[in-house]
Amino acid sequence: MLAMSISEGRKKLFELRRRVVEDCDEAILTHKDGNVVLISMDQWVSWQETERLMNDKRALQMLEDSIKRHQQGDQSGKPAEIVFSDLL
Protein backbone atom coordinates (compact mmCIF):
# COMPACT_ATOMS: atom_id res chain seq x y z
CA MET A 1 0.00 0.00 0.00
CA LEU A 2 1.27 3.40 -0.97
CA ALA A 3 0.65 6.70 0.80
CA MET A 4 1.42 10.17 -0.50
CA SER A 5 0.00 13.65 -0.68
CA ILE A 6 -2.74 14.24 -3.19
CA SER A 7 -0.41 16.68 -4.99
CA GLU A 8 2.24 13.97 -5.37
CA GLY A 9 -0.46 11.52 -6.44
CA ARG A 10 -1.58 13.90 -9.17
CA LYS A 11 1.96 13.92 -10.58
CA LYS A 12 2.12 10.11 -10.48
CA LEU A 13 -1.47 9.35 -11.47
CA PHE A 14 -0.68 7.09 -14.44
CA GLU A 15 1.88 5.10 -12.43
CA LEU A 16 -0.58 4.82 -9.52
CA ARG A 17 -3.27 3.55 -11.91
CA ARG A 18 -0.89 0.91 -13.22
CA ARG A 19 0.09 -0.27 -9.73
CA VAL A 20 -3.49 -0.28 -8.46
CA VAL A 21 -4.90 -2.18 -11.45
CA GLU A 22 -2.04 -4.49 -12.41
CA ASP A 23 -0.52 -5.17 -8.97
CA CYS A 24 -3.79 -5.11 -6.96
CA ASP A 25 -2.29 -2.36 -4.82
CA GLU A 26 -3.99 0.54 -3.05
CA ALA A 27 -2.88 4.15 -2.76
CA ILE A 28 -3.77 6.49 0.07
CA LEU A 29 -3.82 10.10 -1.05
CA THR A 30 -3.53 12.45 1.90
CA HIS A 31 -4.89 15.98 2.19
CA LYS A 32 -5.44 18.30 5.14
CA ASP A 33 -9.21 18.24 4.47
CA GLY A 34 -9.41 14.44 4.36
CA ASN A 35 -7.75 11.43 2.80
CA VAL A 36 -8.93 9.20 -0.03
CA VAL A 37 -8.02 5.70 -1.18
CA LEU A 38 -7.40 4.79 -4.81
CA ILE A 39 -8.40 1.19 -5.63
CA SER A 40 -9.13 -0.68 -8.86
CA MET A 41 -12.65 -0.80 -10.28
CA ASP A 42 -12.71 -4.59 -9.81
CA GLN A 43 -11.83 -4.22 -6.14
CA TRP A 44 -14.41 -1.47 -5.66
CA VAL A 45 -17.17 -3.55 -7.29
CA SER A 46 -16.23 -6.50 -5.08
CA TRP A 47 -16.38 -4.36 -1.95
CA GLN A 48 -19.73 -2.89 -2.99
CA GLU A 49 -21.16 -6.39 -3.44
CA THR A 50 -19.79 -7.45 -0.05
CA GLU A 51 -21.27 -4.35 1.57
CA ARG A 52 -24.64 -4.99 -0.08
CA LEU A 53 -24.62 -8.60 1.08
CA MET A 54 -23.62 -7.69 4.63
CA ASN A 55 -26.54 -5.23 4.81
CA ASP A 56 -29.08 -7.67 3.37
CA LYS A 57 -30.02 -9.72 6.44
CA ARG A 58 -32.03 -12.28 4.46
CA ALA A 59 -29.26 -12.88 1.91
CA LEU A 60 -26.63 -13.03 4.66
CA GLN A 61 -28.67 -15.60 6.59
CA MET A 62 -29.13 -17.69 3.43
CA LEU A 63 -25.38 -17.57 2.79
CA GLU A 64 -24.58 -18.61 6.37
CA ASP A 65 -27.11 -21.46 6.19
CA SER A 66 -25.65 -22.62 2.89
CA ILE A 67 -22.11 -22.62 4.31
CA LYS A 68 -23.27 -24.67 7.33
CA ARG A 69 -25.02 -27.20 5.10
CA HIS A 70 -21.94 -27.49 2.89
CA GLN A 71 -19.69 -28.03 5.93
CA GLN A 72 -22.04 -30.81 7.04
CA GLY A 73 -21.64 -32.51 3.66
CA ASP A 74 -24.97 -31.49 2.14
CA GLN A 75 -24.40 -31.27 -1.62
CA SER A 76 -28.04 -30.57 -2.51
CA GLY A 77 -29.13 -27.35 -4.07
CA LYS A 78 -29.01 -25.68 -7.42
CA PRO A 79 -25.87 -25.74 -9.56
CA ALA A 80 -23.83 -22.54 -9.69
CA GLU A 81 -24.71 -22.10 -13.37
CA ILE A 82 -28.38 -21.74 -12.40
CA VAL A 83 -27.86 -19.61 -9.31
CA PHE A 84 -25.47 -17.21 -11.03
CA SER A 85 -26.94 -17.32 -14.54
CA ASP A 86 -27.42 -13.55 -14.51
CA LEU A 87 -23.68 -13.10 -13.95
CA LEU A 88 -22.49 -15.46 -16.67
Image (cartoon, grey):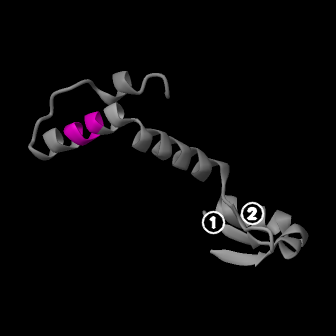
Above-or-below relation of 34 to 63: below
Above-or-below relation of 17 to 83: below
> Is residue 16 one of those drawn in magenta?
no
Q: Give the dominant element type of the magenta stretch: helix, strand or loop.
A: helix
Q: Is residue 56 left or right of residue 6?
A: left
The image quadrant that residue 53 belongs to is: top left
Q: Residues within 10 Å of mark 1 (few under 14, many from 20)?
A: few
For image coordinates 70% across by 67% down, the residue present is 19
Task: Give the mark, 2 or 1, whose residue is nearer the N terminus.
Answer: 2
Q: Are marks 2 and 1 in contact (CB under 8 Å)?
A: yes
Give the image location of residue 70, x and y in percent. 17, 41
For image coordinates 15% across by 28% down, the residue present is 76
Choose between 28 and 16: the one closer to the eye. 28
Q: Number of numbered discs present?
A: 2
Amino acid at dot 1: Asp
Q: Looking at the rendering, in which quadrant would you find the N terminus?
A: bottom right
Q: Is residue 44 left or right of residue 60?
A: right
User: Helix, strand, or loop for circle 1?
Assistant: loop
Give the image location of residue 82, x and y in percent. 35, 21
For image coordinates 53% across by 49% down, the residue present is 47
Q: Which mark is residue 18?
A: 2
Amino acid at dot 2: Arg
User: Helix, strand, or loop for circle 2?
Assistant: helix
State which region is magenta.
61-66
Mark 1 lies on residue:
23
Task: Determine the residue located farthest toward the front in the rendered image.
Answer: 33
Give the image location of residue 21, x and y in percent. 68, 58
The residues tagged by marks 2 and 1 sit, at their Cα atoms, a distance apart of 7 Å
For image coordinates 48% across by 22% down, the residue present is 86
Q: Residues within 10 Å of mark 2 (few under 14, many from 20)?
A: few
> Is residue 64 one of those drawn in magenta?
yes
